[in-house]
Image (cartoon, grey):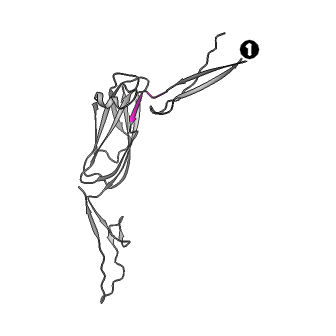
């Protein structure tokens, strides 16, 4: 008898464990009442970005920053980036991105990768201070994986930061000396950290 088994396999990261499923078939054969069929394999996305999220922990306002991500194709020898777009507008005008071909050395570091691109993201100087969350949608030429999204997160800090005791309010940038005695005065040390 012919037995047909179908699975809806979910995609996973390229370095995840192998997929394994089995099914037991009950028969009327007295010698073999149960037949176990197993399927083993690895299911991966056609395209995967490493890292999947870009995190920039300390971007200085005056210098900006540069980050990279590798985009690997596992089923195609010819990955092309057709288009890209940013989701949010807070950093509009401060982000530049371009894509470069990956060399054989870079491809060899990723098991099962057949082609790839390097995404180079540049954040220009003058970014607004504080946290930022952005995402880029990359459109590829591959019909089975036409789009991938990469999150971009970070913190923009000023080039000059004041470090002090509890009296310094960082958000307001105020050194609060409180009530000062005219006879005794007050002394407070403030450290200045200059980056860039």
Looking at the image, is 28 positioned above or below residue 13?
Answer: above
Q: For residue 47: magenta?
A: yes
Find residue 163 and report its horizontal and vertical position in percent.
Answer: 32, 67
Q: Quadrant of residue 178?
A: bottom left
In the image, taking residue 16 as reference, residue 89 lies left or right, namely left
| Count of numbered marks | 1
Where disc 1 sits, the SS reads loop
Residue at the farthest bottom position: 183
Q: Nearer the viewer, residue 39 or 165?
A: 39
Q: Nearer the viewer, residue 133 or 48?
A: 48
Looking at the image, is 153 positioned above or below residue 3?
Answer: below
Q: For residue 64: magenta?
A: no
Looking at the image, is 147 positioned above or below residue 38?
Answer: below
Q: Quadrant of residue 88?
A: top left
Q: Residue at x 45, y 33 (%)?
A: 15
Q: Quadrant of the N terminus?
A: top right
Find residue 108 and report its horizontal and vertical position in percent.
Answer: 34, 29
Q: Which residues are magenta?
A: 43-49
Q: Residue at x 35, y 36 (%)?
A: 85
Q: Quadrant of residue 130?
A: bottom left
The residue carrying mark 1 is 31
Find residue 111 and report its horizontal and vertical position in percent.
Answer: 40, 29
Q: Nearer the viewer, residue 11 or 35?
A: 35
Looking at the image, is 101 positioned above or below residue 125?
Answer: above
Q: Residue at x 35, y 75 (%)?
A: 176
């Amino acid at each position: 008898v012919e037995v047909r088994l179908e699975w809806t396999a979910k995609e996973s990261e390229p370095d995840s464990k192998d997929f394994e499923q089995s099914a037991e078939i009950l028969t009327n054969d007295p010698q073999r009442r149960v037949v176990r069929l197993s399927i083993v394999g690895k299911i991966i996305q056609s395209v995967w970005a490493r890292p999947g999220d870009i995190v920039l922990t300390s971007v200085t306002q005056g210098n900006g920053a540069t980050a990279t991500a590798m985009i690997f194709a596992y089923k195609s020898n010819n990955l092309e980036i057709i288009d890209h777009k940013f989701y949010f507008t807070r950093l509009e005008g401060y982000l530049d991105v371009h894509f470069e071909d990956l060399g054989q050395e870079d491809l060899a570091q990723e098991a099962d990768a057949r082609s790839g691109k390097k995404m180079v993201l540049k954040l220009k100087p003058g970014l607004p201070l504080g946290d930022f969350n952005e995402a880029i949608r990359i459109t590829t030429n591959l019909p089975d994986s036409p789009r991938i999204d990469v999150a971009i997160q970070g913190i923009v800090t000023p080039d000059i930061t004041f470090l002090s005791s509890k009296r310094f309010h960082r958000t307001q940038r105020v050194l609060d000396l409180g009530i000062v005695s005219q006879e005794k005065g007050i002394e407070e040390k403030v450290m200045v950290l200059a980056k860039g």
